[in-house]
Image (cartoon, rainbow, N blue to C red):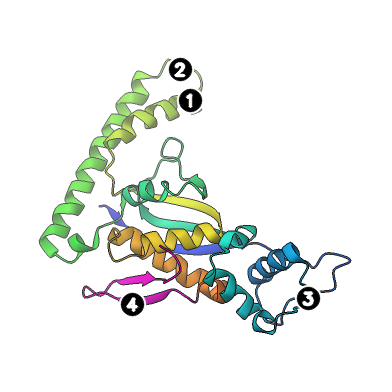
Amino acid sequence: MALEKELDVQLIAASRFAVPDGVDWVPDDGVSDAEAIVEFAGRACYETFDRPNPHTATNSAYLHHIIDVGHDALLEHATATIYIRGLSRAAGNELLRHRNFSFSQLSQRFVHEDESEVVVPSLIAQDEELHRMFVRAADETRFIYDELLKTLEENLAGEPNSLLRRKKARQAARAILPNATETRFVVTGNYRAWRQFIAARASEHADGEIRMLAVTCLEILREHAPTLFDDFMISELTDGTKMATSPYVS
């Protein structure tokens, strides 16, 4: 029977900051490395390490100012890497449209799952009969996939390279797998790219699954670098799902 997967998002890497030798400046206590990097990059442009403007003397004030005036290119100096599991290939195809990210995606050609692992759309999951239909269809598709794979491997028995034989069989058989099949990503992006992704995909008008991913990424990144994401407001829609908006990103 099909295994239903739920979204799992984890921050696995982020930029680290070290004050350069010969620079008489240290970041405020308690700020994250990402926040320190962005402030340092801005101050390095004008050699304002002595914090001459009292209105932007603190890290929080400085970062809020650059976001307010649209000087967000500075955010490109800090990066975060997120590991995503439990995402459908349909939503994964939408994620891949964000070209400012770097992606590594689970290979259906190389990896053979023992079970049918699928992501059930929320509208279908809420309806008992539709949910049964969906799972049954996923099971039937998986049966056909397994039969195709078995026959393809038999047809390719003359290929002496066993690894190549398996790859060829899987890359042909996988064409029958549904868009709901689970995929996994390692995604790296700078903080400007993450803000743009969240602004576009946490919108009320975005697809529900990728909106949930965007809001989850926002919650994780805001915990890691709060000042860089505290302009986003998370609210609940009438269906109980979440959305997020910012007045500074369109």
10 Å neighbourhood of mark 3: few (<14), some, or many (≥20)? few
Q: Which mark is residue 235?
A: 4
Tell me if residue 82 can be seen: no
Disc 4 or 3, which lies upstream in sequence? 3
Q: Quadrant of residue 49?
A: bottom right
Q: How far across and how far down the image is residue 236, in percent?
A: 30, 77
Q: Which residue is mark 2?
A: 159
- Asked which secondary structure carries label 2, the reply is loop
Q: Are marks 1 and 2 in contact (CB under 8 Å)?
A: yes
State the predominant SS element of the stretch in magenta: loop
Disc 3 or 2, which lies upstream in sequence? 3
Pick out the residue farthest to the bottom.
54
Tell me if residue 105 can be seen: yes
- For the residue pair 31 and 76, the one nearer the viewer reads as 76
User: Mark 3 and mark 2: span between their CA atoms?
Assistant: 62 Å
Identified by mark 4, the residue type is Ser
Give yes or no for residue 232 being in the magenta stretch: yes
- For the residue pair 74 and 104, the one nearer the viewer reads as 74
Identified by mark 1, the residue type is Leu
Q: Which mark is residue 26?
A: 3
Front label number (3 vs 2): 3
Front label number (4 vs 1): 4
Disc 4 or 1, which lies upstream in sequence? 1
User: Mark 4 and mark 2: span between their CA atoms?
Assistant: 56 Å
Pick out the residue farthest to the right.
22
Q: Which residue is mark 1?
A: 164
Disc 3 or 1, which lies upstream in sequence? 3
Identified by mark 3, the residue type is Val
**Residue stretch in magenta:** 230-250
In the displayed structure image, the side of residue 11 where residue 244 appears, left or right: left
